[in-house]
């Protein structure tokens, strides 16, 4: 009887071993299949990224080419076919945005008020932005401010290096930043905002203080209502900076976005300055 019991235990053990082996084999197969899918996903993303980069390069060449070959520079999307893909590319002239380093406090206050802050909160935050960008020579509290910045708060007493840096200014919330960031730049390098290149959102901010912006906003509204035909897209201006955005969708919800910021100099030996690419 003991021998029969031992044989039964051996059979059960063998069955358990077989079941465990089957589970292990199945798990390995699932991992191999998942890794293969990930590999294909990485290849798809790499291909989409290369196509998006190519579309950005094509756009740069168009900006440097004759007027007839140039893209609209007001942020309108244009389809760029390449390697069997249709890439959506937009070009935005940075001269139509509000420059964080040069725009005066009144327009900054108007921007913040339009984004939902009350008058006093907008005034305080606009002052903080101006204080942040002041040079040490122009900032009587520069030593204190430098120490505060090193500690992780307070103004840096230097120009903004990017719009993203605005998030470090005391009083700037993430929600407010998301609302105003698309209207801002550090690349126009002038206190003047050209309404010809501005989005409707920027024109809405400027219309209260700039008659030209008010007229441009009214024209956009009339175009949208069909009262007047769309105006010709403004062309490339030498010396201006441009943000190029290429977006491409692929299989399985894959999506790639490439953004470049360049300045068209007009200089034969150095026709282009690249600020960002990625």
Image (tube, rainbow, N blue to C red):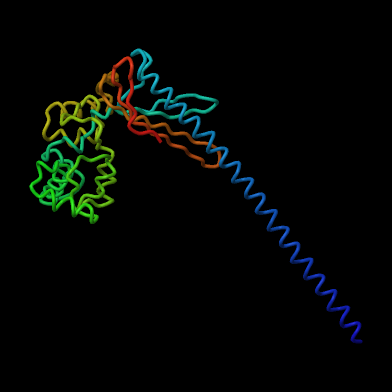
User: Is residue 27 placed above or below 258 in the rendered structure?
Assistant: below
User: Is residue 220 placed above or below 138 in the rendered structure?
Assistant: above
- Asked whether the viewer can see residue 221, the reply is no
**Horizontal placement of 16 versus 210: left or right?**
right
Residue visible at 29% across and 46% down?
178
* Residue 75, quarter of the rendered image: top left
Q: Farthest residue toward the left?
A: 140
**Horizontal placement of 255 versus 3: left or right?**
left
User: Is residue 111 placed above or below 171 in the rendered structure?
Assistant: above
Along the line of sight, the residue nearer the viewer: 32 or 154: 154
| Horizontal and vertical percent position of residue 192 | 16, 29
**Horizontal placement of 28 versus 94: left or right?**
right
- Asked whether the viewer can see residue 147, the reply is yes
Q: Farthest residue toward the bottom?
A: 1
Residue visible at 70% across and 53% down?
29
| Horizontal and vertical percent position of residue 135 | 14, 41
Along the line of sight, the residue nearer the viewer: 148 or 179: 148
| Horizontal and vertical percent position of residue 222 | 23, 26
* Residue 182, quarter of the rendered image: top left
**Horizontal placement of 68 versus 105: left or right?**
right
| Horizontal and vertical percent position of residue 156 | 19, 47
Along the line of sight, the residue nearer the viewer: 48 or 252: 48
Specify the quadrant that holds the N terminus.
bottom right
Residue visible at 12% across and 28% down?
211
Along the line of sight, the residue nearer the viewer: 13 or 229: 13
Specify the quadrant that holds the C terminus.
top left
| Numbered marks: total | 0
């Amino acid at each position: 009887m003991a021998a029969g019991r031992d044989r039964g235990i051996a059979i059960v053990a063998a069955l358990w071993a077989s079941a465990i082996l089957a589970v292990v084999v199945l798990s390995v197969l699932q991992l191999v299949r998942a890794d293969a899918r990930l590999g294909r996903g990485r290849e798809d993303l790499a291909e989409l990224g290369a196509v998006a980069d190519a579309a950005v390069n094509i756009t740069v060449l168009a900006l440097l080419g004759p007027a007839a070959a140039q893209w609209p520079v007001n942020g309108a999307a244009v389809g760029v076919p390449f390697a069997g893909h249709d890439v959506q590319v937009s070009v935005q002239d940075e001269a139509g945005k509000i420059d964080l380093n040069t725009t005066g406090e009144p327009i900054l206050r108007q921007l913040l008020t339009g984004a939902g802050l009350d008058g006093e909160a907008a005034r305080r935050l606009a002052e903080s932005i101006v204080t942040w960008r002041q040079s040490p020579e122009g900032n009587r509290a520069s030593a204190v401010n430098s120490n505060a910045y090193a500690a992780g708060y307070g103004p840096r007493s230097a120009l903004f290096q990017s719009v993203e840096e605005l998030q470090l200014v005391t009083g700037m919330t993430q929600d407010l930043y998301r609302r105003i960031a698309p209207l801002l730049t550090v690349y126009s390098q002038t206190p003047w905002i050209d309404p010809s290149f501005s989005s409707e959102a920027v024109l809405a901010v400027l219309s209260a203080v700039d008659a030209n912006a008010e007229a441009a906003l009214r024209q956009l509204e009339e175009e949208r209502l069909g009262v007047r035909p769309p105006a010709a897209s403004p062309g490339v201006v030498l010396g201006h900076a441009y943000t190029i955005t290429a977006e491409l969708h692929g299989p399985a919800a894959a999506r790639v976005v490439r953004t470049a910021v360049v300045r068209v100099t007009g200089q034969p030996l150095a026709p282009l300055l690249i600020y960002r690419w990625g």
